[in-house]
Image (cartoon, rainbow, N blue to C red):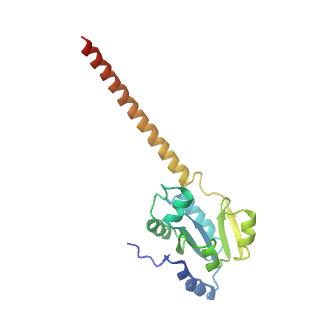
Amino acid sequence: MIKSNKIIFQAKKIIPIVKKLRKQGKKIVLTQGSFDMVHIGHGRYCEEAKKHGDVLIVGVDGDKKVRKRKGPNRPVVPEKERLEMMTYLSAVDYVVLKKLKVPKYNLISLIKPDVLVATKKTYNQEQIKHLETICGRVVVLEPMATTTTSAKLRRLQIGAAKEITKTLSKKFIRVMEEMIEELKNGDE
């Protein structure tokens, strides 16, 4: 059961929070992503993003949004757990659920951050120019870990497949040997 006051399930509910923060003179940073199977790269990324302002808001893609973008077996971790997990990162001040059926750049338009932080693969140059009309500036960060969640999942799948193949091969050979023995004994 999630009880954190840092989690916003309806994007519009971030508006009064942002207004209050702006009245306090706070510089607002926004970043977004799936954050499936939170790892060291996510932590480093959020730490680096926070350096660009006073308050870090993280948009976390909902399960349906992740599934549409990354395939039927994703996310591995359900949205409520991913949202809660992000609140444990010290750099993160607020987490907002991003649902599938909302307009592109919806959260960016609602928050109008002073700084939008993204990775290289997120936006092309044309998109960045457009986004800079909505927010103060766009900062593009390098990857913060050697592998991504997707790469880690592929490695796990390959490892599991190899183990299954090894186990099945041994069993298959044993069954074939037994069948050959039975056939030999049946001829006697």
Residue 178 vs residue 93, the one in the foreground: 178
Q: Give the residue drawn at x 53%, y 75%.
A: 94
Relative vertical location of residue 161 with respect to residue 175 in this rendering, above or below: below
**Quick check: 107 left or right of 79?**
right
Q: Quadrant of residue 48?
A: bottom right
Q: Position of residue 79 (x, y in %)?
A: 47, 66
Asked which quadrant contains residue 32, the reply is: bottom right
Q: Position of residue 121 (x, y in %)?
A: 66, 59
- Of residues 166 and 137, the one nearer the viewer is 166
**Residue 41 x, y percent position in the rendering:** 57, 58
- Tell me the residue at 29%/14% (across/down): 184
Give the residue at x 54% y 58%. 40
Q: How many numbered markers are drawn?
A: 0
The foreground one among 186 and 88 is 186
The quadrant of the picture occupied by the N terminus is bottom left
Seen in the picture, residue 146 relative to 93 is either above or below; the reply is above
> Can the viewer see residue 35 in this picture?
no
Whether residue 131 is visible: yes
Residue most toward the bottom? 23
User: To which quarter of the image does residue 142 belong?
Assistant: bottom right
Q: Which quadrant does the C terminus fall into?
A: top left
Horizontal placement of 104 versus 164: left or right?
right
Q: Position of residue 38 (x, y in %)?
A: 50, 60
Q: Residue furthest top?
A: 188
